[in-house]
Amino acid sequence: MTLYPAAEIPTGRTIIGDVEYMQDAKGALVPISLVKPQYKLEDELVRKIMGFAIALSEQVSRFKEHTFDDLGSFEALLAQEYESTVGGAKGNKTLTSHDGLFKITVQVADNIVFGSELQIAKGLVDECLNEWAQGSRDEIRAIVTRAFNTDKAGQINRSEIFMLLRLDISDPRWLRAMKAIRDAMRVEGSKTYVRCYRRATADSAWQAVSIDLAKA
């Protein structure tokens, strides 16, 4: 399977002898004279937009690569010249222009997965809920249900799991369940995010510089 770069998007047309053909989705060559005008226009439009889209995607990839290189070089310079680095735990950092109008944040997010201990935690939580059936609050039941249900991607709802850990419940089984949840947590790598912000004046609210087509 070939993923064409922007500069190499094929025209989808072939000339054999004196006849021009367009290839269909099944790979068959159809004489262009037999292709409806709206299909030819649609084909041209899609290829034109895809050319710009792929070029933009390639540019964003280069931007990301250069940004991480530049940030790394800056950190190396600080470490060499001043024996210091920017940022706090896990590499999170904020860099700001001298006039306070531009800001770049670097955030490192851990990829957290859950081991088999999570099923033990679910069993203990179920025991508590069954015993508290008459007196348990509906909101606690709702949180528990959402926490242990998987989302559309088949993943545990992590935000709801973390909400369980914040509940102040002293039942020994509940406490054992929360310990099992903590023991189930595994950090499998991390991902670094770079976000850019700007504002008109030093006391204005920050506005994100969007590089997401859906949010532009």
Image (cartoon, rainbow, N blue to C red):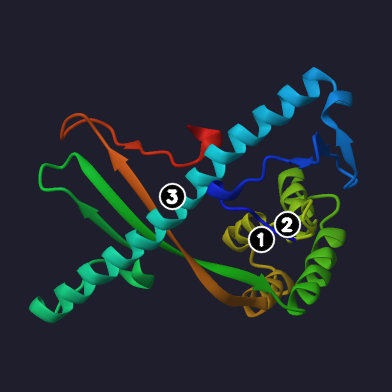
Q: Residues within 10 Å of mark 3 (few under 14, many from 20)?
A: few
Q: Residues within 10 Å of mark 1 (few under 14, many from 20)?
A: some
Q: Is residue 216 left or right of residue 182?
A: left
In the rendered image, which quarter contains the N terminus? Answer: bottom right
Residue under label 3, please give it. 59
Q: Is residue 113 left or right of residue 28?
A: left
Numbered disc in front, either 2 or 3: 3
Q: Based on the displayed image, in which of its 4 quarters is residue 208 positioned?
A: top left
Q: Residue 123, image x and y in percent? A: 83, 71
Looking at the image, do the residues carrying marks 2 and 1 touch, with CB atoms under 8 Å apart? yes
Q: Residue at x 17, y 78 (%)?
A: 79
SS of the residue under disc 1 = helix
Specify which label sits upstream in the sequence, 3 or 1.
3
Figure disc tally: 3
Residue under label 2, please give it. 147
Q: Residue 117, image x and y in percent? A: 74, 79
Residue under label 1, please give it. 161
Q: Indicate whether 55 appears above or below 148.
A: above
Q: Residue 47, image x and y in percent? A: 65, 36
Q: Residue 187, image x and y in percent? A: 57, 76
Q: Residue at x 57, y 52 (%)?
A: 5
Q: Indicate whether 101 appears above or below 131.
A: above
Instruction: Give, as a three-letter code, the residue at label 2.
Output: Ala
Q: Residue at x 41, y 57 (%)?
A: 62
SS of the residue under disc 2 = helix
The alpha-carbon separation of the residues under discs 3 and 1 comes to 38 Å
Pick whichever, 90 or 27, lies toward us: 27
